[in-house]
Every structure is written in structure tokens, then in C-alpha cells.
Image (tube, rainbow, N blue to C red):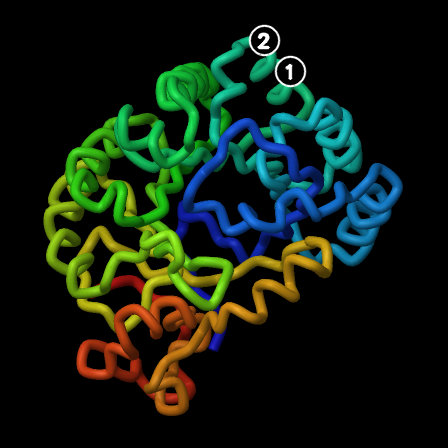
Amino acid sequence: MERKVPVGRVDLAKYIVVSVWFGCNNACSVCMLSDIRGTLPPIGLDRYRDVIRDVVREERFENLILSGAEVTTFNELDRYVRFAASFDWFRKIQVQTNGRRLADRRYLDNLVACGVNEFFVSVHGLEEVHDAITGVAGSFRETLAGLRNLEAYKGVNVITNTVLNQTNVRELRPLMNFLAGLRTSEIHLWNLFPMGETDRRDLLVGLPEFLQILPEMLEEVGPSGKPLVLKSFPECLPAGAPAVFDDWFPVTVLPNRFWQEFGRSGFGSCVHREKCGARECWGLSNAYLRKFGDERELLSPVGGRDAAGSRGAD
């Protein structure tokens, strides 16, 4: 069946992600790239130009995401943005970022002037918790300053991104209240997927614990009218509005080393996989299975084999 996304929501099927740079100014405990980041080469201008030209020629994707580790630490980012914008093809040019450099208004002004009109900003907790996760004292204050600066741009869409983990799980309710009050269109909450076969940092949160706090989170987000987009959570979990399951993984240009490590991590495992119609569901990871088991009593097949994969929560 055709993928259906409500009007006004971000449809990642229309985006392509190009990872251009793997330097970073944070040391996040939840980063999927943490162990391999230093081994990943930048895409390089020539390869980047070829990718962008191919996308425009094929007319397959109408939106572009520029990512990496922390792409705003790449000194040539504005040049890459201008090249993509020069084709006048992409409706959205998004930058995925921790938001710290956006605290510099002149830097932000330049990115927007070059063609960036969407920002995906990571906020993993309130001040102390966020700083603990990022490993950088003061990072929350800089990210918040960047988010406040973004409020000045009426034509720029802002989405927040939070990764569920043991460090932030007990303050997710006040965090959701805080995020709901920002000038953003969507709040994304990712289930942590360790890039490895074990949860060696003891960061994973069990699904039963998550389900206990989910209703409180929805109470905080609901009055804002914004969706709480659940990413990489099993789509059969019980959740009400404004929760939306959306596990679409956009086409992503990354070095081969990343995909080798990604494949070893067992994403998409589920005891009910053969009977389930949720074609986009990420299921569970090897690390989760080793720590908590397969949750066969908690999870259940969604629809039939022909059911649509991504759905809103009832």
C-alpha cells in the first residue's frame, strides 16, 4: 500500500540523507557513530556534487538532509548548501545538528541565506542531563540559544530529536513539556539502538518502563497540537494521540564501514516478524534481546501482511 503521511508532517520518503562530515564538538553517549566516527572519511566535494546532480536528474527526492556526526563543525558546509540550492530543485534543505553553533546568529544567518530552511536539532534532556549525555558542560545552554535564534525565521521549519536512554528516562515528562513550548513542528523520540551486539554502556530502557511513562509524556505534548513521533519503537506498542509511529528510514549516503557495523547489530529482530504487516517496523536489536529478551508477550503482530507499515497510534 502507498505510504500515507498526514498533511503538514515531515515525510522522510521524500528525503535523501547525505552524510558529508564526521567531526563533532560533542561526545554523546547515545551516538551510533561513537566507536567508528574517527574511521569514517568525509564525502569530499567531487563525490558530493555527483550525488546531488544524480538526485536532481532522477527527480526521485524533493528534499535533502545534510548530516554526518556534527555537520556544523564542517567549515565548508555553506558551500555545500549553496551548491545544492543552486539547482532550485530541493523544497527542503535540512541540517541535522546538535544546535550549538546556531547560537552564533551570524553563522545561522549565513546558513539560512545559503538555502537551509529546515533544522533537526537534538535535545536529550534539560540542562544537567543533556550536558551529561553530550559530555560537554554548557552544551544545553548553547543548543537552547540556537533554538531561540531559530524562532526569528518564520519560513524555517524546526524539529527536535531526543534519544531515549537510562540517563534521561526519569525526566522525559518535564523535557516533553519544555519541547512542546518551543516553536517547532514535531517532537521526535528515538529508541536507542546501540551500534553493537550488547548494551555495554547500560543505556537501553526496557519497553515496559517506557510504556509506564509514555502517557505522562503525551499529556505534556498534547495541548501543543504537535505530534510526538516515535522512531524505532515496535509499532505494536499501545500509544494514543498525539503519538505517531514512523519508522521510515530514508535513503542515506554513508561510507561502507557504517553499513557493515549497522548490519551486525541485528536491527529489525522480532519474534512476530513473519506474521506482522508492519513493513517499516525496526523491531528490536541484538543488544536489546540480550538484555531484556524478545518481549514476545508484550509485542504482537500488526494487521496482516498487506497492512501499511507506518501508522498513527490509535
Amino acid on which disc 2 is placed: Arg
In this view, 136 is above or below 58 = above
Neighbourhood count class around disc 1 (C-alpha, 10 Å): few under 14, some 14–19, many 20 upward: few
Report the residue marked by disc 2.
Answer: 106
The secondary element bearing badge 1 is classed as helix
Which residue corresponds to the image point at 64% horizontal and 63% vertical from the top-left? 259
The label shown at residue 145 is none
The label shown at residue 110 is 1
In this view, 38 is above or below 125 = below
Say whether marks 2 and 1 touch (CB < 8 Å). Answer: yes
In this view, 13 is above or below 143 = below
Which residue corresponds to the image point at 26% horizontal and 71% vertical from the top-left? 292
Q: Is residue 150 left or right of residue 260?
A: left
Residue 147 visible (yes or no): no
- Give percent across and percent down for residue 8: 40, 45
- Give percent across and percent down for residue 159: 41, 37
Compute the Cα span from label 2 to label 1. Answer: 6 Å
Q: Is residue 99 left or right of residue 124?
A: right
Camera-side residue of 91 and 41: 41
